[in-house]
Amino acid sequence: MKSTGGEQTITVNADLEITIKPAKFEPNINLDHLDVSGISKGRTKIEAGEFIGSCCSTKVYGIVEEGIVRKLEFSKCEASKRPPKFLKAPVAKAMEAIKPASGGSFEPMPVKKFISHARRGFIDIGGGGGCIYICIFDFCYFCCVVDGDTLCGEAIVVKG
């Protein structure tokens, strides 16, 4: 046992059960009003919607080139930051667990198909970014992958 100025501390490494839940994706209400033929020419950026989190939302954009959505961009939630030391290992394990199911990269698709996917909330973390909830005991963290970096918000208490 380690003594720190009269207090004794013990550090124990233990396996934790981690629950991973998809974050709610809210499609942009303007998707129905986009002129698909108009944005199919040249290069543009369209807002698909946003992941709703505990402290703020993370917007999702499709980058369109010649009628094909080539990649996704994700806004960075200002209140999010890299996970604290105690959360790094669980977050890394959670991200590793979801990669095989998602494929890990965005597959380019025509604008019309992309809009259809966004309307149904089929934007997932496999597209090179996105958001999930990582829950440990009664605490959940809203974590997003933005530009290859994992950022998490403050813990929210979930009783259930």
Image (tube, rainbow, N blue to C red):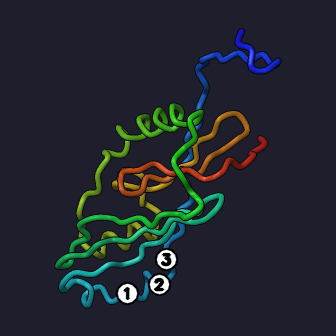
Look at the picture and state if 63 lies above or below 148.
Answer: below
Point 57% across, 36% down: residue: 87
The type of residue carrying mark 1 is Leu
Residue 28's mark?
A: 3
Marks 1/2 in contact by CB < 8 Å: the verdict is yes
| Screen quadrant of the C terminus | top right
- Residue receiving disc 2: 30
Q: Is residue 17 left or right of residue 31?
A: right
Residue in view at x 54 percent, y 33 percent: 90
Residue 88 x/y as whole percent = 52, 36
Question: Relative to the observer, which residue lies in front, 51 or 120?
Answer: 51
Amino acid at the residue labelled 2: Asn
* Contact? badges 3 and 1 (CB < 8 Å): no
Disc 3 from disc 1: Cα separation: 11 Å
Say if 58 sits above or below 19 in the image.
below
Q: In the picture, which quadrant includes the N terminus?
A: top right
Which amino acid, by three-letter code, is at mark 3? Asn
According to the picture, the residue beneath numbered tag 1 turns out to be 34
Dividing the picture into quarters, in which one does residue 60 lie? Answer: bottom left
Q: Secondary structure beneath disc 1?
A: loop
